[in-house]
Image (tube, helix red, strand yellow):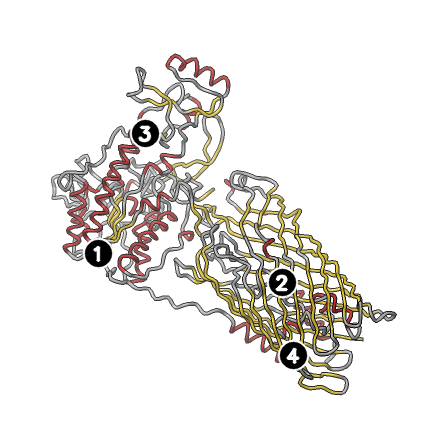
Amino acid sequence: MRQVYFLIVFVMLVACKPKAPENVYTAGEADFSSFTAIGDGHTGGYMDDALYRDGQENSLGTLLQRQLTLVGASDVSVPWMETGNIGVNWNGQARLLLGYKTDCLNNTSLSPLRLSPQGELSSLSTSAYNPSSKFSNFGVPGLRTIDLVSFLLGNLNFVNYNPFFARLSKDQFNFPGSGSFSTYQENVFDGGYPSFCSIYLGIEDVLPFAKSGATSNPMSPVAGLPGIGFEESLGQLCQQLHAQNVKAVIATIPNVSEWPFFNTIPYNGLKLDEDKAASLNQIYNPLGFSFVVGDNPFMIADPNAGMFGVRPALPGEKILLSAPLDSVRCYQMGSVFPFRNEFVLTLDELNEIQTRIDQFNAIIRQKAVAYGFALVEAQNFYNKLPSGFAYNGVTLSAKFVSGGVFSLDGIHLNPRGNALLANEFIKSINHSFKSNIPLINALMFNAVLFP
Amino acid sequence: MQPNRPLFIWTAIFALSLFNTFFSQGFQVNFQGQKQQGMGCAGSALMQDASALFYNPGAACFASASEVNVASTPIFANVMYVDSSTQEVFRTKNPVGTPFAAYALIQSKKSHRLACGISITTPFGSTVQYEEAWIGRFAITRLAMKVFHIQPTVSFKVTDNIGVGAGFVWSPGEVELEKDLPVQFNDGTFGHAKISGTARGFGYNAGVFYNSGGFLSAGLSYRSGINMAVKTGTVEFQVPGGLEANFPNGSLTSSLPLPSVVTLGLNVKPCKNWNAVLDVNYVGWKTYDTLSFDYATNTSSLLDTKSARRYKSILAFRAGLQFAAISDESGPKLIGRIGGGFGFSPVQSGHVTPETPDADRWYGTAGLSYVFSQHFSLDASLYATKLQRADTNYETGLSGTFTTIAFCPGFGVNYKW
């Protein structure tokens, strides 16, 4: 009897597992066999203020394509950076990582630091181009929509030179005058059109202006010929894809001013004790500004603000993460010395940026409808972040470092954020092309790493 | 077969493993008697053995003799989770659970109206362990909860047909809860948290039993709710050095309410050798509204948590048949049983959690008893269920379908004198 009993137990152990459903992934009405990601650094894996190998591995374009391989896409081909993961940014600096930093008050805390004194400069002078393996991820940091058809982009002698483009261009670092320069778009379509594209453009048409505190790098105009205005630059790309029967997914531009770079330092982050409030009152009372013990708005420079061009920041105005924090802590920046214009976005400036983004997005939506592209409201995804949302047991938000979505530059998404955004692309593709492509488990991808 | 052999096996199984659920509403474990388990877990109106101490203290005084009864029901439960967005499949790797029940019922030599007894049962518990790196790892990776009910009981026959009984329940317990934390070390591995503690609670169990002496018997019992208070739990964190100040190891308090259970039971004996039983349970799960953890040291990253559970009180219906297949002059020798039941889930939509992936459920059971002598008998039972629940949790955002299959073969031994 006991043997029978144990036999029953044994059979049950083996037999009582629920059967997994058989997943059938389908491409639907689209053909993903040759996929190309068109975009800027947000597509190419720029993060932690640099382009580096791990970032590329976990870029929007790469993650999206890897998932599309389930429905027939070929494997990714990327202009890889070096495997050392030092990375490089526009100024030749290495990527950021979280480390211990001692500030001017001798307080040590976790802060984004450069991985090494110098970035991976060699990658900006070595061509990654390989004629036998066409890139599938054309995410080029800094690429504006109006750069798509520019012949200057790969020419070192011109102001619009983009080293991240030059290293993947088929021109392979032509010396000035020694050859002709090809455009971004010529490179993308070199050797034949893809069967499917993702298009995520427009951020770089507004972001550099916002990052400069609205002092330089003007936003791209709406109107103008291809290469000058946003509408026709994007339009000619879409038209060309459509004419060649290329299907695509296209995304709107998020409200960049909601990102951590613009929201980590509160407008009223000026904490004062009695002495400091008194001394500031002495300075500013004659101008009509007064200070209290506790939280006060930072003082900012605003040429339109009265005779002295100084005023307290208003609720909703942004102090940028580029502001020198040690100067704030120890050298009275933001109080005795107002924040310079380049560290501030005023309400007027924010309004100007938002208006331009809205105009661009209206164009993007219109092109998506006109050409039958799947549309990703990237804006809707980003808009969920400031208040945070629960994802498989984790609360994700736009909070700097701890929010789990943005990388240490406060602008570009980290791998986890890219996976979440790639999911928005997949949802849109599934919806528009009746495909069944599973989403990515974004928590399998890194957020900020801690020492 | 000698009586001490199964006893030894039972002890070994118990020593080796924990017990778990997944086969009963919420984290209730309805395995307190092999004979009842054979009949759809019903039997509060049929006095059969010392397990009446649990099912209906009012019936215990109708025992024909003093008795010791021990049983265990290993649980083989497998949960599969299919994530709705990634379509990925994850499974549990639960250890075999072993709820057990041990009873001693003593009939008073002086007054046949009085019986006393003590029982040790495990009416609540859960052990669930998900596979490595499963998608809900930040909600839970492992839960092990054990609750013992130790219940001294007195049962008194008021008339020849009516018995009343009551017991005091001392309920010690243990809980361990583990999950990964969404903070990453430099090598990409995730932080981890483990909460553990012992809990104490008190309650009671009372019942009335009516026996017509022939065709019909009925029972009504009430097991009180018990608040299992964790007064000195501990929490341990594994986090990167840079975050240790944010996640201080330390103590915490919490509590877990166990619901009250009202049972109305009926037993009819339509003809010789046959019994039909029906139990209706009303389980007061509404008491489990919130799961909260109050950490002794709070930081900006470690706040006290209040997590909505919002269970609702539920009804469960259990029914079964018993048939004495072989009898001799001393009574039945071989008894067969079959039964089944249906229980509503106390877990409302939007609140399904991976620690209790509960659903409305049907289940079937079967059982056998063999009486070796007037002293010694053996019981066996088998319980099987499959349940499925699709949900999106409001709090965690986990969205998918849990499927559970459980087989629970039980085995028990009785000794009467």
Q: Nearer the viewer, mark 1 or mark 4?
A: 4
Compared to residue B260, the image places residue A339 above or below, namely: above
- Spot occupied by residue A271 in the image (x, y as percentages of width and height): 46, 25
Mark 3 in CB contact with mark 1 (< 8 angstroms): no
Mark 2 in CB contact with mark 1 (< 8 angstroms): no
In which chain is the residue bearing label 4?
B
| Residue at (19, 54) in percent of width and height | A131
- Spot occupied by residue B206 in the image (x, y as percentages of width and height): 72, 61
Compared to residue B62, the image places residue A46 above or below, namely: above
Task: List the residue tagged with mark 2.
Answer: B18
Q: Find residue A347 and name its label.
A: 3
Q: Nearer the viewer, residue B74 or A212?
A: B74
- Spot occupied by residue B309 in the image (x, y as percentages of width and height): 54, 52
In which chain is the residue bearing label 1?
A
Q: Nearer the viewer, mark 3 or mark 1?
A: 3
The three-letter code of the residue at mark 3 reads: Leu
Q: CA distance from mark 3 to mark 2?
A: 62 Å
Which quadrant of the figure contains the C terminus of chain B?
bottom right
Q: CA distance from mark 4 to mark 2?
A: 31 Å
Q: Is residue A180 visible?
A: yes
Task: List the residue tagged with mark 4.
Answer: B322
Going from N to C along the chain, the mark reached first, 4 or 2, is 2
Going from N to C along the chain, the mark reached first, 3 or 1, is 1
Element type at mark 3: helix
Element type at mark 1: strand
The three-letter code of the residue at mark 4 reads: Gln
Element type at mark 2: loop
Residue B235 placement, left or right of A370? right
Is disc 1 on the same chain as disc 2?
no
